[in-house]
Image (cartoon, grey):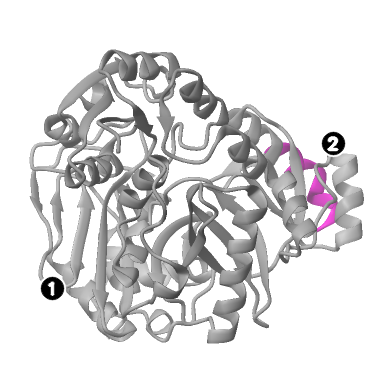
Amino acid sequence: MFQRILIANRGEIALRILRACRDLDIDTVVVHSTADADSLPVQLAGRAVCVGPPRAGESYLNTAAILTAAQSAGCDAIHPGYGFLSENADFADACAREGLKFIGPSGEVIRKMGNKAAARSLMRAVGVPVVPGSDGAVADATAARRAADAIGYPVLIKAAAGGGGRGMRRCFSPEELEGTFEEARSEAVANFGDGEMYLEKLILSPRHIEFQILADRHGNVIQLGERDCSIQRKNQKLIEESPSRALTPALRAAMGEAAVKAARAAGYENAGTVEFAVDREGRFYFIEMNTRIQVEHPVTEFVTGMDLVREQIRIAAGLPLSRRQEEITLTGHALECRINAEDPRRGFAPCPGTVDFLHLPGGLGVRVETALYTGYTLPSFYDSLCAKVVVHAPTRLDAVRRMRRALEELVIEGCTTNAALAHQIMYCPEFVRGNVDTAFLERNLDTLLKWCDTGEEGGA
């Protein structure tokens, strides 16, 4: 087992990794920017090292500074969390060259699955269903038009190196294709430094279902069930749950088998997520594979009873998986609400600020992942996620009721958040019935905000 791990991240995920390391009696080193000098992970870490100024490109993405920090502190591994360097193949390779274990898949696998067009081709080759689309990348708008004509409108223009909804645009007609294509490609270049694009058939209002997988170096690959991530805003997830009401036992088994097949085809090692779109007829299609721990991993931890970060560390240390597939059972129902410092009434504009007062919910089946504390100032340089409220209960309805109660107990004063919106979603009849898809928020946002303003729960 590792003696000392450097945590190359910030906020709640840095704190989550730190706690897992403490449970394993592993020393920790946390890197931070000057903007995060007073953050909770920095205060609780065994050692903290400043790696640069506030901007991520000069700190959390500063590979040279992070590697130097790891070496000088005597670390033998680096955990990247999610975001930042977690899916950076060059960084994974650099860790290997420096004798540091990257807690995640190899750089080769990250490249293989990080390029969405190449990943689609691999999945097609091994028989995993993929959304109809272009045969690989499209070079320019002219090639995109030919592909769109062959696929049939509407289409989804996507960045091959994309993620988080960036470099992605819908296109409903030939007339708008050229402008939409160039807009998506410009965003891809700005965010990923890569303008490679491809096209997929746009499946209108699907369910977004992802399967958690774990794979070790001994050839063991298992899946830990699904998470339904259909409630999104501009492809950014807001609420996740497990299990999904959309899956029958047969469909769940088929999708789980496909997820394991995808991981094996990639030669995968560590924790990962295979994402699918499920249409209204119950057909599922591979979207992409995320080669890292996910924001919503606590949902799976609740229903399986497994510590996924602990498993990541064990796998990276060369140990076999702690469970076999036949030992995985999903118990009860879990829900997660992402609480972001943003204003839903102003287009979800980020709202950083100082937390004047904080009260976190508790009680049976309630878990809160956050690095907030009273007096902490949320920096304006990073993602607006400030807390994750997660609940677990015997049934979905019990979980919904528990989440209502938890959100009512949550108090974050000093920053505008989306907590009231999440609370109203818990009362929305469409959500309570489980009839959700990726267009849920688009259909219901105005009504939900009206209920927030009137204080009426579900319009009652």
Instruction: Give the main secondary structure, helix, strand or loop, of the magenta stretch.
Output: helix
Q: Residue 60: x, y in percent? A: 38, 25
Q: Is residue 44 left or right of residue 316?
A: left
Is residue 14 rendered magenta in the image?
Answer: no
The amino acid pointed to by label 2 is Ala
The numbered mark, 2 or 1, whose residue comes first in the sequence reads 2
Instruction: Between label 2 and label 1, give the one nearer the viewer.
Output: 1
Q: Is residue 233 left or right of residue 158?
A: left
Q: Is residue 172 visible?
A: no
Q: Residue 5: x, y in percent? A: 29, 31
The amino acid pointed to by label 1 is Leu
Is residue 180 rendered magenta in the image?
Answer: yes
- Residue highlighted by disc 1: 364
User: Which quarter of the rendered picture does the N terminus lie within?
Assistant: top left
Q: Is residue 175 visible?
A: yes
The residue at 46%/36% (across/down) is 86
Q: Is residue 7 left or right of residue 151?
A: left
Local SS, label 1: loop
Q: Compute the Cα span from label 2 to label 1.
A: 54 Å
- Residue highlighted by disc 2: 139
The correct choice, above or below, for 399 with respect to 259 in the image is below
Instruction: Identify the magenta region.
Output: 172-183
User: Which quarter of the rendered picture does the C terminus lie within?
Assistant: bottom left
Task: Check residue 138 in the rendering and tell me which mark sits there, or answer none.
Answer: none
Neighbor class of circle 1 (other Cα within 10 Å; few <14, some 14-19, many 20+) is few
Local SS, label 2: loop
Numbered circles on residues, count: 2
The correct choice, above or below, for 259 with respect to 387 in the image is below
Q: Residue 423: x, y in percent? A: 27, 69
Q: Is residue 27 left or right of residue 224?
A: left
